[in-house]
Amino acid sequence: MMPNDLYKGMSTFYNAFVQRNRDYKAIATDLIDLFGNAKTILDVGIGTGLLVEQILQLRPDLDIVGIDTSSSLLTQAKQCLGSKVTLYCEDISNLHLNQMFDLAYSRGGAWAFVNDGDTLWLASHILDLKTIEQSFARVAAHLCDQGRLIIISSNANHTKSEQADNEMLFERTVTKELIEDRQYLILNYQGYHLGNLVGEQQIRMRLIDLEYVEKILDSVGLRSISDHNGEYHIYQKRSFQ
C-alpha cells in the first residue's frame, strides 16, 4: 500500500516556498562537517531533493538513499537528482531496506525539533505515539554499529507570508492545538498566483517533549551525544558487542 501523500496539495509551489525559507547550502555545509567519515547516508523525508542536491555538490562521493511518503515530491526529487540518489516511496515506520547506513538524518521529513520559546518539541508527521516509537526502531535497525541519527531543528512553526515576485504569494499559518491531552502543530499552506489560489495543504504534526523523545530513542539503542547549540540533535547507536 502506498503511503499517504501529505504534500500533494502544495507540490506545485513547494520548491519556491521552501527555497525562500531555508538556506539549504548552509544546512548542507553544516551536515557535511557533522557527517565526518560517514559514507552511506539515509535521508528520512527527502522531499524534492533540494538539500541533497547541495550536499552532493560538496560531497559527490556520498552514497545517499532518500525515502519519502510523498510520491508527488519524489517525482520532483527524481528530476532534480537523476540517478545520483536511490529513492523510495516508503513510510519510515515500516522501512525494510536491504542496506545499512553510517548515518541517517531528518529535517521535517519525518521529524524535526521546534522551539516555541518555552519548550523544545519533536514535531512528527507520524501522529500515533506507538508508530513514532516504531519509526525510531526502524531507523536504528538500519544503522551500522555506532551509526548516527541527526534530527535537525526547523523554523517551520511560525506563521509567515512571502511575496515571491509580482505574481506569486505564499502563506503559512501555524497554530498549536491540544486534543485529548495531545499537542499538535497545525500548518496551513496556501500558494496564490495573481491572487488566485493554485494550491493548498494542511499538515498536522504531533508534538512530543524532548525528555520523552530521548527516552524512546534510548529504548531503541540510540543515545544523545550532542545537540550543537540546539540546531542538530545527534544520537548514536550503542554497540551491543
Image (cartoon, helix red, strand yellow):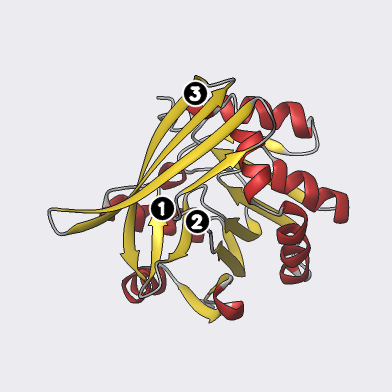
At label 2, the amino acid type is Val
Q: Which quadrant is home to the N terminus?
A: top left
- Verify CB contact (< 8 Å) between mark 3 and mark 1: no
Q: Position of residue 142 (x, y in %)?
A: 55, 55
Quick check: marks 1 and 2 in contact, CB under 8 Å?
A: yes
Residue on which the image places disc 2 = 139
What is the number of the mark on residue 135? 1
Position of residue 216 relative to residue 194, above or below, is below
Q: Amino acid at mark 1?
A: Ser
Q: Say which residue label 3 marks.
A: 199
Residue 191 horizontal/vertical position (percent): 53, 28
Q: Residue 59 appears at what percent x and percent y?
A: 85, 55
Q: Nearer the viewer, residue 74 or 160?
A: 160
Label 3's element?
Answer: strand
Up-down relation of residue 80 to residue 225 (above or below): above
Picture quarter containing residue 67? top right
Q: Quadrant of the C terminus?
A: bottom right
Q: CA distance from mark 2 to mark 3?
A: 32 Å
The 10 Å Cα crowd at callout 3, few under 14, some 14 to 19, many 20 or more, is: some
Specify whether residue 225 is in view: yes
Numbered disc in front, either 3 or 1: 3
N-terminal of the two: label 2 or label 3? 2
**Residue type pointed to by label 3:** Gly
Work out how far the residue at label 1 is from the one at label 2, CA to CA, in angstroms.
6 Å
Image coordinates for residue 107, horizontal then vertical, percent? 56, 55
Q: Is residue 40 left or right of residue 58?
A: left
Q: Give the quarter of the image for residue 3.
A: top left
Q: Residue at x 38, y 66 (%)?
A: 121
The residue depicted at 62 percent of the width and 28 percent of the height is 168
* First-in-chain label (3 vs 1): 1
Q: Residues within 10 Å of mark 2 (few under 14, many from 20)?
A: many
